[in-house]
C-alpha cells in the first residue's frame, strides 16, 4: 500500500550524517541527476533533499510540453537529446511516461515572424531535428479548429511545424525517476529543507537542513525557481535571474478536437488537448518577481480572449482549474549549469524558466557526469555563469529579457 | 493575488499599469575603471530575495514616473520601508 509511511518509490530511509553527494530540490533536474549518478557512475550514496514533497515545484505544475526546435546551436542538441530520451527512459524506468509525440505547431502572424521561423527551421534541420514551415492552408488542413480568417487581431500567416515534439506526463516523470533512483540506492528525503551550505577553504563541506547537518563534498542546487534565492542567501553568489509567476489552466473536458500542441507568441498563449479531453493552456508571466504562485483573473480573461480568437470553437467553454508556478528567467532565456566555480564541489542547474521540463532527462545525464568526474561535459560548457560578464549571452531570444531600470 | 502599487503621484493603482524596473542596485557605476565584471553585476545580477526588497517601478500606463518601493516577494504586498538591517 502506498500511504503515509510507504512512499511510492520504496522504503523510507533514515537521514544519514554524510553522503558522497547531496542534491537540493526533489524536482525533475534533481531526481534525474540522482538517477544518472547511480545508474551511470555507480554513485549510490546520494541524498535528494526536498523541502516539501517531490514534484512540489515546477515539476508538478508545468504544462508538459516537450520539443527540440530552440534557436541556437548550443541549445538545440541538448534539447534533441532530451527529446530522444523519452522512449528510452520509459523502457529503462519501466514506467509509462505517456509520451504523446503529437507535434508542435508554432503559429506565425506576420511575414517578419515567418522569416525568423525560417532561421529556426534551418538551425533545427542542420542539427537533425525535424522542423518545417507550413502556410495557412496547410495548417487548416492539419488542425481544422484553427481560425485562419483575416478578421482576428493577429491573423495567422503560417506556422513552424515540429512533428517529433509533444506532451509527456509530467508527474509520471517525477515518480518514474524517483522510483528508478531509489531502486539503485539513492535516498529521497521529503519534508527536509536545506537551510545553509557549508564551505571551508573554498570547498564544499556539507549542508544544514531542518533535520540536521549533513557532511558531503558535493552539493547540487537544483531547486527550480527557488535556486537563485537560495544560492544568494546561502553562498552570497548573485545570479542573472528574475523569478516570475507563470500560470496555466484547463477547461472542462471535450471530445477530441485538437491533436497538436498549438502555440502563438503574438497571442502569448499555447494550448493542447490532454488525453482526458481538457484543453490545457498557458499564458505569459506576470512581469514582476515574486514567490507566491498565486493566480490572477487577468490571465483567465487573457486566455479566454486569445483562445476564442484563434480556436473559436472554444468560445463559451468553461475553465475548470487554474494554477501558478515559478519561472526563473535569465536575460538570454538559456539556463545556467556550472560547477566548481568559485567553490569546489558546488554545482548549480537553474535558470530554466519555462523550459525545465523538456530538458530534464538529458541535463540529468550530463550534470551527473559533471558531478561524478568533476569536469564539465562539452555540451554543458556554453551554459556557464561567466558568459554574462564575458558578454557571451546565448541568443535564445532575439531581444534581451531584462528587468532593470536602465531600459 | 492582484498586485497594487502606490505611485507617488497617482496613489494606489492596479499593478498591471506598471512596469517593473528591477531590484534597487544603487547608483549606476562610474564609467572610469569599470570592469566587465562590475558592469555585469550592475546590469544582470540579482539577489532574488524571498522577503522584502527595495525595487524600481515605472508608471507606464499612468503618469510616467519612476519610483522605488519596498515589496515583500513572498506576499506580493507593498510594505512600509523596513528598518535598515545592514
Ligand atoms: C505553469 C508552468 C508551465 C510550464 N510549462 C513547461 C512546459 O510546457 N515545458 C517545459 O519544458 N517546462 C515548463 N515549465 C518549467 C518547468 O516546470 C521547470 O523549468 C522545471 O520544473 C524545473 O525543474 P527543477 O527540477 O529544476 O525544479 P522544480 O521542479 O521546481 O523542483 C525544485 C524543488 O526544490 C524544492 N526546494 C526549494 N527550496 C528548497 C530547499 N531550501 N531545500 C530543499 N528543497 C527545496 C522545491 O520544493 C521543489 O520541489 C513550466 C512551469 C510552470 C510553472
Ligand atoms: Zn503615476
Image (spheres, rainbow, N blue to C red):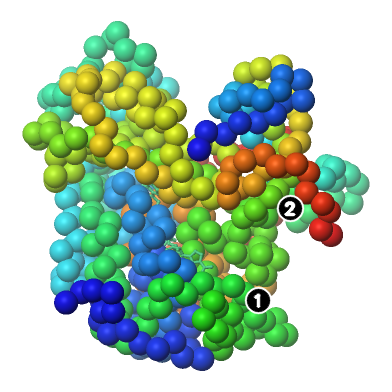
Q: Chain of mark 2?
A: B
- Does residue A390 show up? no
Residue furthest out toward the top:
A151
Q: Position of residue A397 (x, y in %)?
A: 50, 40
Q: Is residue A313 left or right of residue A322?
A: left
Give the numbered dot on residue A343.
Answer: 1
- Mark 1 Cα shell of 10 Å, populated few (<14), some (14-19), many (≥20): some
Q: CA distance from mark 2 to mark 1?
A: 19 Å
Helix, strand or loop at mark 1: loop
Write down the residue under mark 2. Answer: B41
Q: Quick check: A169 above or below B32?
A: below
Q: Position of residue A399 (x, y in %)?
A: 55, 35
Asked whether A260 or A172 is in front, the reply is: A172
Q: Quadrant of the C terminus of chain A?
A: top right
Quadrant of the rendered image containing residue A249: top left
Q: Residue at x 44, y 87 (%)?
A: A15
Residue furthest out toward the right:
B32
Amino acid at each position: 500500500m502506498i500511504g503515509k509511511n510507504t512512499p511510492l518509490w520504496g522504503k523510507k530511509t533514515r537521514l544519514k550524517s554524510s553522503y558522497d553527494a547531496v542534491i537540493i530540490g526533489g524536482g525533475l533536474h534533481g531526481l534525474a541527476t540522482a538517477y544518472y549518478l547511480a545508474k551511470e557512475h555507480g554513485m549510490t550514496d546520494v541524498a535528494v533533499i526536498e523541502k516539501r514533497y517531490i514534484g512540489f515545484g515546477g515539476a508538478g505544475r508545468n504544462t508538459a510540453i516537450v520539443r527540440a526546435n530552440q534557436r541556437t546551436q548550443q541549445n538545440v542538441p541538448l534539447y534533441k537529446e532530451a527529446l530522444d530520451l523519452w522512449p528510452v527512459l520509459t523502457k529503462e524506468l519501466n514506467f509509462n511516461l505517456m509520451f504523446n509525440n503529437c507535434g508542435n505547431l508554432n503559429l506565425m502572424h506576420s511575414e517578419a515572424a515567418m522569416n525568423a521561423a525560417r532561421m529556426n527551421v534551418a538551425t533545427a534541420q542542420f542539427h537533425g531535428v525535424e522542423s518545417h514551415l507550413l502556410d495557412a492552408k496547410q495548417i487548416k488542413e492539419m488542425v481544422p479548429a484553427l481560425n485562419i480568417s483575416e478578421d482576428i487581431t493577429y491573423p495567422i500567416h503560417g506556422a513552424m511545424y515540429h512533428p517529433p515534439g509533444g506532451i509527456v506526463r509530467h508527474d509520471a516523470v517525477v515518480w518514474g525517476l524517483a522510483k528508478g533512483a531509489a531502486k539503485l540506492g539513492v535516498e529521497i528525503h521529503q519534508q527536509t529543507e536545506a537551510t545553509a551550505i557549508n564551505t571551508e577553504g573554498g570547498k564544499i563541506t556539507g549542508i544544514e537542513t531542518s533535520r540536521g547537518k549533513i557532511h558531503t563534498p558535493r552539493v547540487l542546487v537544483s531547486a527550480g525557481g527557488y535556486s537563485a534565492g537560495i544560492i544568494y542567501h546561502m553562498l552570497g553568489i548573485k545570479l542573472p535571474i528574475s523569478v516570475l509567476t507563470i500560470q496555466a489552466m484547463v477547461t472542462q473536458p471535450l471530445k477530441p478536437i485538437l491533436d497538436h500542441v498549438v502555440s502563438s507568441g503574438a497571442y502569448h498563449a499555447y494550448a493542447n488537448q490532454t488525453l482526458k479531453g481538457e484543453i490545457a493552456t498557458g499564458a505569459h508571466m506576470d512581469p514582476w518577481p515574486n514567490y507566491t504562485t498565486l493566480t490572477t483573473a487577468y490571465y483567465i480573461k487573457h486566455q479566454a480572449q486569445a483562445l476564442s480568437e484563434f480556436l473559436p470553437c472554444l468560445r463559451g467553454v468553461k475553465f475548470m482549474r487554474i494554477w501558478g508556478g515559478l519561472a526563473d528567467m535569465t536575460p538570454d532565456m538559456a539556463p545556467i549549469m556550472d560547477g566548481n566555480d568559485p567553490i569546489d564541489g558546488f554545482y548549480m542547474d537553474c535558470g530554466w524558466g519555462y523550459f525545465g521540463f523538456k530538458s530534464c532527462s538529458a541535463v540529468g545525464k550530463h550534470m551527473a557526469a559533471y558531478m561524478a568526474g568533476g569536469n564539465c561535459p562539452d555540451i554543458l560548457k556554453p551554459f556557464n555563469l561567466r558568459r554574462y560578464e564575458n558578454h557571451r549571452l546565448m541568443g535564445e531570444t532575439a531581444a534581451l529579457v531584462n528587468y532593470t531600470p536602465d531600459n | 493575488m492582484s498586485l497594487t502599487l502606490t505611485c507617488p503621484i497617482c496613489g494606489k493603482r492596479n499593478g498591471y499599469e506598471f512596469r517593473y524596473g528591477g531590484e534597487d542596485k544603487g547608483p549606476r557605476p562610474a564609467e572610469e575603471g569599470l570592469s566587465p565584471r562590475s558592469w555585469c553585476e550592475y546590469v544582470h545580477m540579482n539577489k532574488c530575495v524571498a522577503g522584502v526588497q527595495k525595487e524600481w517601478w515605472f508608471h507606464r500606463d499612468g503618469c510616467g514616473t519612476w519610483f522605488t518601493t519596498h515589496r515583500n516577494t513572498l506576499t506580493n504586498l507593498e510594505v512600509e520601508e523596513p528598518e535598515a538591517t545592514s
